[in-house]
Structure formats: structure tokens, C-alpha cells
Image (cartoon, rainbow, N blue to C red):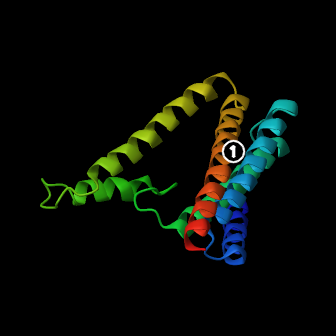
């Protein structure tokens, strides 16, 4: 349910902002940073137990963040950068490969996407062996760094584009 609410919020955000993708991405990243940070704090302060309200709250916060992210990625329509459908990237890699009779176009990008997802999964699993707080804090921190780098860069690109056209 929380995922669907998040996806709906991401859709509302996209509709309100329109075609101004940098503003949409910045807003969505800001929401994701907040939700991941709250989940990390809940897990660290209250502790998380399976079947307990605290565990359900952390799962709901993460699902909400994932829904917002998926709606944003869907809106941007970047090829081979799906967040939850790794199988489509793998399918494209295999189906479009030269051995399968395809051109092999996009293979490097697809392999990089699969490698990034694999690296994230391995790091997350290793962190989870120590504590649930570590991967939540790492995810929150990475999302925060991404937001802090993305927003100023997007503003500079927009200012440069506007100064050239104006």
C-alpha cells in the first residue's frame, strides 16, 4: 500500500512540476532523503523487530520512498535504468546481443547498470549482516549526497540554458 501511495505522490509531483525535470528530480530526491533518514532514525532509536510496529513502519517508509523514486524514473524514461525491473535490463542485454542476432547496441550501458545494481546489493547485504541501521544510514547518506550534488548542478544547467536563449 505504501509503495502505491509513494508512486501516486511521485505522479502528483510530476504533474504539478510539468516538464521541468530538474525540479521534479530534486523534489523527489528531497522526499526520498527525508523518508530514508526517518527510517534510519526509527531503526536506530526504536529498534526494528520482525512483526513489530517498528518493523512495519520502516518497511512502509522505504516503500513510500521507492514508490516516489519509481514514478520519477518512469517519468524521466531513461533507457535501461529501471529501479525494480532488473530483468528487463538483462533481457535487453541478452535479446539484443550479437549471439542472439542483435546489434549489441547499448550493451555497455546495460552491463554497467547490472554491475551497479550488483555492487549495491552486495554492499547492502554485507551492511545488513552487521545491523539494519547501517544500510538504512548508507542509503540515506547516498541519497543526500546525490541530492546535494544534483540540485546545484541542475540549477546551473538551467541558468546556462536560459542565458543562451534569452
For label 1, the residue is 148
Residue 51 in view: no
Numbered marks: total: 1
Q: Is residue 108 above or below residue 49?
A: below
Q: What residue lies at 87% left-to-right and 34% top-to-bottom? A: 46
Which quadrant, please, contains the C terminus?
Answer: bottom right
Circle 1 SS class:
helix
Where residue 145 appears, as percent x and y from the top left, is 66, 40
Q: What residue lies at 22% left-to-right and 60% top-to-bottom? A: 96
Where residue 32 appears, as percent x and y from the top left, is 71, 52
Which residue of the protein is positioned furthest toward the top in this rendering? 130
Where residue 36 appears, as percent x and y from the top left, is 73, 45
Q: Label 1: how many residues lie within 10 Å, few (<14), some (14-19) or many (20+)?
A: some
Foreground of the two, 160 or 3 = 160
Q: What residue lies at 66% left-to-right and 57% top-to-bottom? A: 155
Which quadrant, please, contains the N terminus?
Answer: bottom right
Q: Quadrant of residue 162?
A: bottom right
Residue 159 in view: yes
**In the picture provided, is 165 more to the left or to the right than 62?**
left
Q: Is residue 140 above or below residue 70?
A: above
**In the picture provided, is 18 more to the left or to the right than 48?**
left
Q: Is residue 130 above or below residue 106?
A: above
Q: What residue lies at 55% left-to-right and 62% top-to-bottom? A: 73
Q: Is residue 117 above or below residue 31?
A: above
Foreground of the two, 13 or 57 = 13
Where residue 78 appears, as percent x and y from the top left, is 46, 62
Foreground of the two, 50 or 166 = 166
Amino acid at each position: 500500500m505504501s509503495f502505491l501511495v509513494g508512486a501516486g505522490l511521485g505522479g502528483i509531483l510530476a504533474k504539478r512540476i510539468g516538464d521541468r525535470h530538474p525540479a521534479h528530480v530534486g523534489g523527489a530526491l528531497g522526499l526520498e532523503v527525508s523518508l530514508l533518514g526517518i527510517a534510519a532514525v526509527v531503526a536506530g532509536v526504536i529498534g526494528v523487530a520482525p512483526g513489530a510496529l517498528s518493523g512495519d513502519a520502516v518497511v512502509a517508509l522505504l516503500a513510500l520512498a521507492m514508490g516516489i523514486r519509481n514514478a520519477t524514473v518512469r517519468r524521466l524514461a531513461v533507457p535501461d535504468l529501471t529501479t525494480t525491473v532488473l530483468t528487463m535490463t538483462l533481457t535487453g542485454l541478452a535479446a539484443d546481443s550479437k549471439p542472439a542476432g542483435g546489434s549489441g547496441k547499448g550493451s555497455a550501458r546495460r552491463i554497467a547498470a547490472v554491475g551497479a545494481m550488483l555492487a549495491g546489493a552486495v554492499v547492502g547485504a554485507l551492511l545488513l549482516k552487521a545491523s539494519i541501521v547501517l544500510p538504512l544510514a548508507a542509503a540515506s547518506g547516498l541519497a543526500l549526497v546525490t541530492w546535494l550534488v544534483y540540485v546545484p548542478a541542475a540549477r546551473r544547467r538551467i541558468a546556462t540554458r536560459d542565458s543562451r536563449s534569452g
